[in-house]
Image (cartoon, helix red, strand yellow):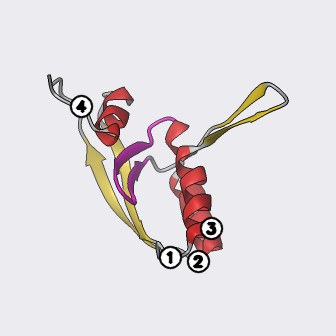
């Protein structure tokens, strides 16, 4: 049996159509734990439980067309690029955006 890594499972759950947009990559100092946590919450979202109730806060990856490509690398369609870049600039995170197209996810 093949063991599936979390990042591969995340990619396989994404829709499989081809898209045009941007690949965005960034670099964060891992010693800045607070910034890393804020960025992780922004990208992946989070769930909080309080008083027996569950609250889900979606992240960037929950937006239509956004694809996780790897550590500190995402694909975003044109409409999501300003949202991501505004956040990264606000947090002082160095980043690069490159015009790109991605194809459909092929079955294993």
Q: Which quadrant of the view contains residue 95?
A: bottom left
54 w.r.t. 45: above or below: above
Specify the label residue 92 is tagged with: 2
Would you name the residue on which mark 1 appears?
31
- Tell us which disc is closer to us: 4 or 3: 3
Would you name the residue on which mark 4 appears?
105
Q: Position of residue 5 (x, y in %)?
A: 28, 38
Specify the label residue 18 is tagged with: none
Sequence order check, earlier mark of 4 and 1: 1
Q: Which quadrant of the view contains residue 100?
A: bottom left
Q: What's the CA distance linking mark 3 and mark 2? A: 13 Å
* Magenta segment boundaries in residue numbering: 63-76
Q: What's the CA distance linking mark 1 and mark 3? A: 9 Å
81 w.r.t. 3: above or below: below
Callout 1: SS: loop
Sequence order check, earlier mark of 4 and 2: 2
Q: What's the CA distance linking mark 4 and mark 3? A: 34 Å
| Figure quadrant of the C terminus | top left
Q: Residue at x 59, y 60 (%)?
A: 37
- Tell us which disc is closer to us: 1 or 2: 1
Callout 2: SS: loop
Left or right: residue 48 versus residue 88 is right
Q: What's the CA distance linking mark 4 and mark 1? A: 35 Å
Q: Residue at x 58, y 77 (%)?
A: 92
Would you name the residue on which mark 3 appears?
34
């Amino acid at each position: 049996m093949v063991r599936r890594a979390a990042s591969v499972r995340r990619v396989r759950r994404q829709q499989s159509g081809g898209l045009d947009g941007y690949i965005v990559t960034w670099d964060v100092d891992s010693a800045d734990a607070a910034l890393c946590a804020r960025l992780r919450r922004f990208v992946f979202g989070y769930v909080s439980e309080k008083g027996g109730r569950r609250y889900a806060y979606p992240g960037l990856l929950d937006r239509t067309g956004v694809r996780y490509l790897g550590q500190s690398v995402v694909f975003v369609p044109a409409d999501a690029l300003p949202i991501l870049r505004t956040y990264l600039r606000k947090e002082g995170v160095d980043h690069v955006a490159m015009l790109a197209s991605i194809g459909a996810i092929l079955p294993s």
